[in-house]
Image (tube, rainbow, N blue to C red):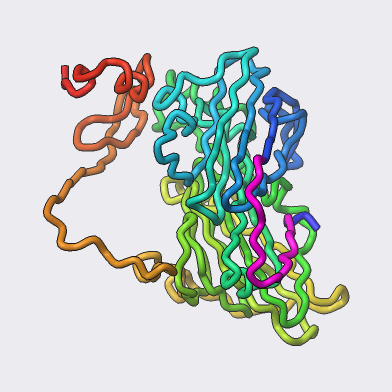
Amino acid sequence: MLAYTLLILLAGGLQVLAARVKVTWDVGYLNISRDGSTTWRAIGANGQLPIPPVYVTQGDILELTAINHLDKPVSLHAHGLFQRNSAYYDGAGFTTECGIPPGSQFTYIIETRDQSGTYWVHSHYGTEGIDGLRTALVILDQDASLLDEYDEDVLLALEDWGQEPNDNLLERLKTLSLVGMPPNHPSVLINGINANILQPIRFTPGRRYRLRVISMSFTYWFKVRLPGHTMQVIEADGIYSQPSAADGLDLGPGQRYSVIITAQELLEFNYALNVTFYSNFIARMQGLTPRYHQVPIVYRDDAPIKTFPMIEDHEVKWVDELFMEPRDKQILLEPVDQHIVRNVKALTRELGIPSYAFGDYAYDPVPVPPLLTALTTGNMALSPS
């Protein structure tokens, strides 16, 4: 089954000793077709794409070593990890580090004692992430009360996949205005596989499934629904919540949710998990934007797929994080005695290329990572000049 599945052994109160989990990625180029239509030079690890998901248990120390066989620097970012007192392992290229030079290697030490849940790892240098250097990172829980809430763990990693190396697209952006430029319509990958040829996810009547949904997209958004079933949302971006009922998930790039779905009691029908791939900043084009995919949810091989009436998006009860309650019941820090306001707005820069800014200042790459500047220039780091 292409959905990465992990059976949860419910041994109440069992505590697993922390371990050092060592993962090595030989990062290099490979020519590959992942969408069934185009072959181009992508970036993978250990000669393969997709890169297998990384699983650790809360409390483990992950040692992720990247050996750079590219002709440019590489950096790896564990998306969603706090990196308290370890910003130098955050992997944000030319923000917290310069990147790993070609022919060199570096080991990221990732502590997990304070976090568990659903994350992902991706390159944070140029377009390497969207060109393939990304995978899921799952930090398994040791909280027995949480493990008692589901029987099986299923991963659903969603990706956008272009028609060529994205460096090519950036080069065209430098010389062309976006006005009149043909839009880029990437394909959809689910667990690293062309979304049109997925194998089914099998459900057993009455079992409770924790579905971890990760948007490993860099451009488009995803909507996920399973008609005929209710989603109980228990995690958003690594933060656990009280169960919150929803009919669907709406995920922007980098977002993650965990939902518990209880399988139907009967084997009468199979179902379809609906995945919509869409963008609000590219004009609708039939068959391209949005795109619709279905993952078969199979209860019985010869059962028909149950159909449901079409409904509009505004009729769906989408998950709303503003109304989710934290599982640990942590109260708001009040009263607030200082407000910091930052206005975010869109700017149109040279050649008609859009960007976003805090106030009137858009981000421009700097020659020295700001973290290194702050750590080596003393009080001068606080000077605006």
- 195 up-or-down from 333: above or below: above
Residue at the right extreme, as displayed: 302
Instruction: Name the residue rendered at 49%, 47% in the picture.
Output: 254
Residue 225 seen by the camera: no
What is the x, y in percent for residue 131?
Answer: 61, 32
Instruction: Name the residue rendered at 72%, 34% in the picture.
Output: 38
Query: Which range of residues does the magenta coloring cover?
Result: 4-20
Residue 149 seen by the camera: yes
- 363 up-or-down from 82: above or below: above
What is the x, y in percent for residue 58?
Answer: 58, 53
Q: Is residue 219 left or right of residue 38?
A: left
Instruction: Name the residue rendered at 66%, 45% in the picture.
Output: 19
Front residue (pair 103, 21): 21
Q: Residue 12: within the magenta?
A: yes
- 354 up-or-down from 297: above or below: above
Where's the N terminus, which quadrant? bottom right
